Amino acid sequence: VQLVESGGGLVQPGGSLRLSCTASGSRFTIYRMGWYRQAPGKQRELVAAVTNGGSTDYADSVKGRFTISRDTAKNTVYLQMNSLKPEDTAVYSCNGRLFVQFEGINDYWGQGTQVTVSS
C-alpha cells in the first residue's frame, strides 16, 4: 500500500492551497485518513482527519480555515486550506490507518509535501 500526496507549494498569507492524498495497492480497507504537519523545531501535530464513517477531527488552530474531505471511490482524501497564515508553514504528511489483508491494521505515511506561507 502506498500513499501519494500532491498539492503543496508556496502561497502568500491569506491564500489557499489544496492537498490530495491517494491510497493505492490491493486488498485494503481504510479506517481513517488524515494530515499531520511538522514545522522546523516543533513536534508533528494532527491537522485534520476523517474516519471511514465520515467523522472529522481538526486541530484548534485550523478550525474554520481548513476542510478535510474524501472521495471513497478514489481512496483519496483532500485538505482544503484557506486563509493560510505564516504559522501554517510546515511539511504536511498524509496518514492512513488501514487494514491490509495478511498484515492487519497499520499506519501508513505519504512522503510529505512542503507548504510555505510567505509574502
Image: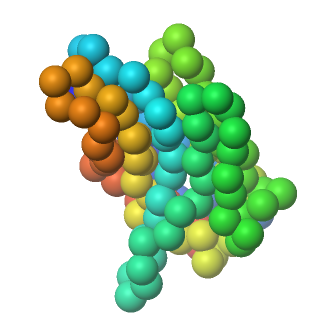
- Which image quadrant is residue 87 in? bottom right
Report x, y in % for residue 63: 78, 61
Residue 56 located left or right of residue 29 = right
Report x, y in % for residue 49: 58, 47
Q: Is residue 57 above or below residue 62?
A: above
Report x, y in % for residue 100: 26, 26
For the residue pair 101 and 68, the one nearer the viewer reads as: 101
Query: Outermost residue, left direction?
Result: 102
User: Does any portion of residue 65 appear in the rendered image?
Assistant: yes
Image colouring:
rainbow
Query: Outermost residue, right direction?
Result: 64
Q: Is residue 71 above or below residue 46?
A: above
For the residue pair 92 and 12, the one nearer the viewer reads as: 92
**Image quadrant occupied by the N terminus:** top left
Residue 1 located left or right of residue 89 = left
Q: Residue at x 68, y 57 (%)?
A: 58
- Which image quadrant is residue 92 in? bottom left
User: Does any portion of residue 3 appear in the rendered image?
Assistant: no
Report x, y in % for residue 111: 28, 49
**Image quadrant occupied by the C terminus:** bottom right
Q: Residue at x 33, y 30 (%)?
A: 99
Q: Residue at x 46, y 21 (%)?
A: 75
- Which image quadrant is residue 53 in? top right
How many marks the image carries: the answer is 0
Q: Residue at x 44, y 28 (%)?
A: 30
